[in-house]
Image: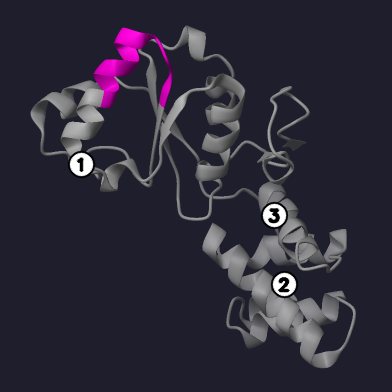
Amino acid sequence: MNQFGLPFDWPAEEETSDFIVTEANQAAVRHLESPGSWPVRVALLTGPRKSGKSLLGRIFAARTQAHVIDDADQRPEDMLFHAWNSAQESRTPLLLIAENAPPIWAVRLPDLRSRLQATPVLPISAPDVPLAEALLVKLLAKRGLALMEDSAAYAAARLERSYIALERAADAIDAASLSQKRAITLPLVRQALESAHLIDGQRGEA
C-alpha cells in the first residue's frame, strides 16, 4: 500500500496528495503514469461511487495538463465524440471518468461507441482489505479521530466490500464516539458497526 505521492512525483494540491494505492487501483494508477505510451490519447477510468476516481482524475490533470471529463456517462454523446477526436488531433491526453464502461454504459451514438471500444479502460475495483483499512483510518482522521490498526483491521475484515460501506462505517463510529464521549476502541467499533447493521453479531465475533 502506498500514498500516491510516493511512487509518483506528481504536483497536486494538498487535498489530493494522499491517494492510497493498493492492488484495487494500482493498474489504473500505473497506466496514468505514462500517457505518452497510450495507444490512443484517451483513457476511460471507471469505478464504484466513492472509489476515488474523481480524485485520481484531478491528480492526473494537475500533473499532465490533460483534459478530464468526469461523469462522462452523463454528458452529451456528441460532445464526447468531438472531445475524443480533438485529443487525437491535439495530442493532449483526455481522461474520461464514469462509473461503468460500455456496454453497461449504453452508448447510442455509433461513432462514439466505436471510439470507446478502442479506448483503454482503467477499472478501480472494490476495496481490498489493505485499502479498506487505510480508508477507514483516513475517513476518521478527517473527523479528527484516531482509529487504531487493530480496530481498522477488525472492521475491514467484516464490512461489505464497498466504498459506500466504509463511509457508513466511519459515520457510525464517529457518531458512537461522540454520543458516548469515548475514545475509539475495538469494543466501541464493534458496537457501532453492529448497531448500524453494517456487521451482524455473529460476524462481529468472528
| SS label for mark 1 | loop
Q: Is 103 situated above or below 129?
A: above
Choose the circle earlier in sequence order: 1 or 3: 1
Distance of label 2 from label 3 (alpha carbons): 22 Å
Foreground mark, 1 or 3, reads 1
Residues in magenta, as a range = 83-94
Image position of 98 (left or right of 171): left
Name the amino acid type tagged 2. Ala
- In the figure, residue 171 lies in which quadrant? bottom right
**Amino acid on which the number 1 mark rests in the picture:** Pro
**Disc sitting over residue 25 in the figure:** none
- Tell me the distance, in whole angstroms, between the alpha carbons under discs 1 and 3: 33 Å
- Residue 161 visible within the image: no
Q: Residues within 10 Å of mark 3 (few under 14, many from 20)?
A: many
Left or right: residue 26 versus residue 72 is right
Q: Residue furthest bottom?
A: 180
Q: Is residue 67 above or below residue 105?
A: above
Q: Which residue is mark 3?
A: 135
Q: Which residue is mark 1?
A: 76
Give the residue displayed 28% in from the left and 25% down from the top. 83
Give the mark nearest the N terminus, 2 or 1.
Answer: 1
Where residue 46 sits in the image (x, y, percent)?
42, 40
- Judging by the rendered image, the residue that carries numbered circle 2 is 206
